[in-house]
Amino acid sequence: MQKVLIIYNRIWPYRIPIFNLLSKEYDLTVSYSIDNSFDEDVDFKVVKFPGKKFLSRFYIHNDSLHKICENYDVVIGYGDIGWLSLVKLLFIKNKSYKLILWGIGVRASYKSSYGEKSIWDKVRFFLMKKTDAVLFYSKDPIPLYVKEGFKKDKLHVANNTVYVDEIDESIKRENLLFIGTLYKQKKIYELLDSYHIAYKKNKALPNLEIIGGGDEFDNITNWIKKENLSHKVFLRGKIFDEGILKKYFSSAIACISPGQAGLSVLKSMGYGVPYISKKNAITGGEIFNIENGVSGLLYENDDELQSIILDISENPDKYIEMGKKAKSFYDQHRKPEDMAKGISNSIKWVLNNE
């Protein structure tokens, strides 16, 4: 059984099912550096590689990663070029281990749109060419990398996803849902304002359930009271328990997030809920899973959202049907097993290409 090391920033709880699956095939160790984000038993080894962050962009580990990596057959590194200890590995010749960098592959953040050009692009391409393989969250960056001179067989995809529980079919789908950290960048107020306008036109709107904490929690609480919507809009706070989340998703007609389309896209699809977002929403590529008008909606203008909310209220079956198609897509292509297989395929490829 080959020894594989994944060098990560944090061990996020949503990654654990994927890592557990990989541990059935490999002697897997996953490292973290920033903090330990989980408190459950796992099937893989866990180690901490401490280090220091500086200039808000760069990170360097305290110990020699190269010496550690020599104990493994394949190393999969966090694909952020600001992680200088990983970058250093790219310049070591005749390494005994294969090195894969894993990430979005293009620029994406709360401050920049997906694929936005940057002075760092050329640096990223230069460094990625020194890896044994590049592993992306989606297939979207591949044409760009091929255009930059990468061999296509070196570029691999492990489509980003999350685990979901079984849908509770006994629960009626009757609510709208927002899930995520409450930042202004996610345009939560665009959702609230659109809901308020729609409510003035139709008092029978589905209730809006908001799951998440964050900077805007108190402000949103005050907004709900100010607009006299405490009987329609419910702020539930942070929820991480999958059994509780399952109930909210099972009762949702649609999940709406105007400003961000991240892993909540996959969570929604897995629970049979269509995802509704703006076409230019912040994303790490997850938005490309949505087939507009089929398994979700991607709208362009802010004033469209109130009309969509009214349409959901008046034609819920249309959106429930979208949710069924979203669920079918998830079951066929985006299960944790599919992501684990993508990672495993990249490992096998580098081992077979000496």
Image (spheres, rainbow, N blue to C red):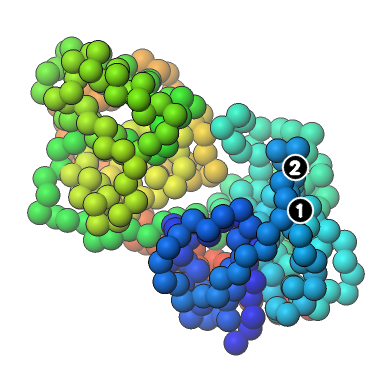
Work out whether 257 lies above or below 284: above
Q: Is residue 324 left or right of residue 53?
A: left
- Dot 2, crowdedness within 10 Å: few (<14), some or many (≥20)? few
Point 63% across, 83% down: residue: 2
The residue singled out by tag 2 in the image is: 54
Q: Nearer the viewer, residue 6 or 127?
A: 6
State the image coordinates of residue 186 (x, y, percent, origin top left).
Answer: 45, 29
Point 18% across, 30% down: residue: 207
Element type at mark 1: strand
Work out whether 207 lies above or below 170: above
The residue singled out by tag 1 in the image is: 60
Point 46% across, 25% down: residue: 184
Element type at mark 2: strand
Q: Are marks 2 and 1 in contact (CB under 8 Å)?
A: yes
Q: Amino acid at mark 2?
A: Phe
State the image coordinates of residue 5 (x, y, percent, origin top left).
Answer: 64, 71
- Dot 1, crowdedness within 10 Å: few (<14), some or many (≥20)? many
State the image coordinates of residue 137 (x, y, percent, origin top left).
Answer: 56, 53
Q: Is residue 50 left or right of residue 217?
A: right
Total numbered labels placed on residues in the image? 2
Q: Can you tell which quarter of the image residue 344 is in?
A: bottom right
Q: Can you tell which quarter of the image residue 73 is in?
A: bottom right
Q: Amino acid at mark 1?
A: Ile
Question: Disc 2 to disc 1, how far (Cα)?
Answer: 8 Å
